[in-house]
């Protein structure tokens, strides 16, 4: 995907158990994004901060589920989670990046948890 191209999903589908979001793009690419990954990689200021230095690692979200998906204009969706987090606006570009880079981003996230002595199962203050 080039930076100036616009890629749009043709389908968004929340799994029956609400633990993942399948995104099918117009070009045929399909990504199954786990709710936990979407939650801990939310593009919200609460997670990403207002600069790279402010980004936090969010622990304890292994069991989080998607509670809702709401369109935002024609460029994004707002995803709500059952832990109350609902401020992330996931653009089509960001969803595509997450899908394309999920393995490496997930590995980085797990390494951050380990480095900070945090767990996917134990909720605590993000840091």
Image: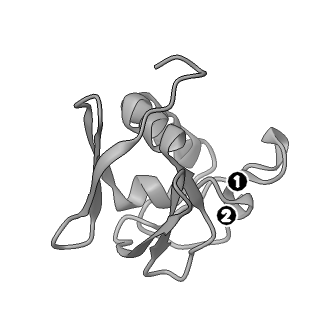
Q: Nearer the viewer, residue 109 or 116?
A: 109
Q: Can residue 39 be seen by looking at this rendering?
A: yes
Residue drawn at the location 74% of the way across and 59% of the way down: 45
Q: How many numbered marks, from 0 up?
A: 2
Q: In the displayed image of the protein, which residue is found farthest to the left?
A: 16
Q: Is residue 26 left or right of residue 3?
A: left
- Pinpoint residue 78: horizontal percent, then vertical percent: 52, 66
The crowding category of the residue bearing disc 2, from other C-alpha atoms within 10 Å (few below 14, some 14 to 19, many at least 20), is: some
Whether the residues at callouts 2 and 1 have beta carbons within 8 Å, the answer is yes
Q: Which residue is mark 1?
A: 56
- Pinpoint residue 102: horizontal percent, then vertical percent: 39, 36
Q: Which residue is mark 2?
A: 126
Q: In the displayed image of the protein, which residue is found farthest to the front?
A: 74
**Quarter assignment of residue 120:** bottom left
Up the image or down, 105 lies above or below 9; here it is above
Sequence-wise first label, 2 or 1? 1
Q: Can residue 41 be seen by looking at this rendering?
A: no
Up the image or down, 112 lies above or below 79; here it is above
Q: Is residue 109 left or right of residue 22?
A: right
Residue drawn at the location 70% of the way across and 53% of the way down: 56
What mark, if any, has residue 75 been given in the picture? none
Q: Secondary structure at mark 2?
A: loop
């Amino acid at each position: 995907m080039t930076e100036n191209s616009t890629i749009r999903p043709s389908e968004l589908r929340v799994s029956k158990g609400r633990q993942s979001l399948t995104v099918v793009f117009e070009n045929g690419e399909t990504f199954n994004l786990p709710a936990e990954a979407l939650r801990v990689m939310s593009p919200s200021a609460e997670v990403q901060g207002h600069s790279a230095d402010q980004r936090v690692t969010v622990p304890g979200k292994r069991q989080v589920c998607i509670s809702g998906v709401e369109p935002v204009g024609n460029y994004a969706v707002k995803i709500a989670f059952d832990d109350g987090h609902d401020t992330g606006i996931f653009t089509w570009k960001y969803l595509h990046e997450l899908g394309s880079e999920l393995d490496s981003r997930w590995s980085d996230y797990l390494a951050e948890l380990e480095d900070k002595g945090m767990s996917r199962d134990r909720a605590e203050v993000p840091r």
